[in-house]
Amino acid sequence: MLPETMPTESVRIAGAAIGVLVILYWTFERLRGEDHDPVLRMSSSSDSGSASFFVSGVMAVVVIAAIVAVLVLGLGGAGPIVANPGAVLVFLALLVFAHWVLEKEESET
């Protein structure tokens, strides 16, 4: 739980900006012709067991875009952090579509 003095809107803006920058970096890398797929990887283990999370390619972009969308829209009672969240969502959808097209072209060659 965040303290009451924490500027939650500023944290949401920063998180959304970081997410968009990550997607733009992945897009730039793919357009440059690098052979690196976007990857999200996390693993954790303890005495009771272990858990792993791994997504790559366009699904990694979808995960980050979904997190950005939740931060921008402010689901759960908070309002949107931008005046026109539709434009941000369309921009995210275009980035996801671009990654899907690039991934499809890579798999066909």
Image (tube, grey):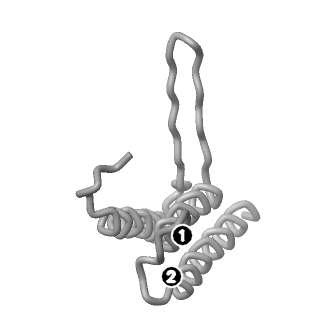
Apparent side of residue 98 relative to residue 27 in the rendered image (left or right): right
Q: How many labels does the image show?
A: 2
Q: Residue 69 carries which label?
A: 1
Residue at position x 47%, y 69% in the image: 78
Q: Where is residue 93 in the image (x, y as percent from the top left)?
A: 61, 77
Q: Position of residue 31 (x, y in %)?
A: 51, 72
Residue at the left extreme, as displayed:
5
- Callout 1 amino acid: Ala
Please name whichever residue, 20 or 25, is drawn nearer the observer in this view of the structure: 20
- Circle 2 residues within 10 Å: few <14, some 14–19, many ≥20: some
Q: Is mark 1 on a helix, strand or loop?
A: helix
Residue at the top extreme, as displayed:
47
* Circles 2 and 1: CB atoms closer than 8 Å: yes
Please name whichever residue, 40 or 102, is drawn nearer the observer in this view of the structure: 40
Residue with the mark numbered 2: 88
Residue at position x 64%, y 70% in the image: 102
Quadrant of the image occupied by residue 66: bottom right
Apparent side of residue 53 relative to residue 108 in the rendered image (left or right): left
The quadrant the C terminus occupies is bottom right
- Callout 2 amino acid: Val
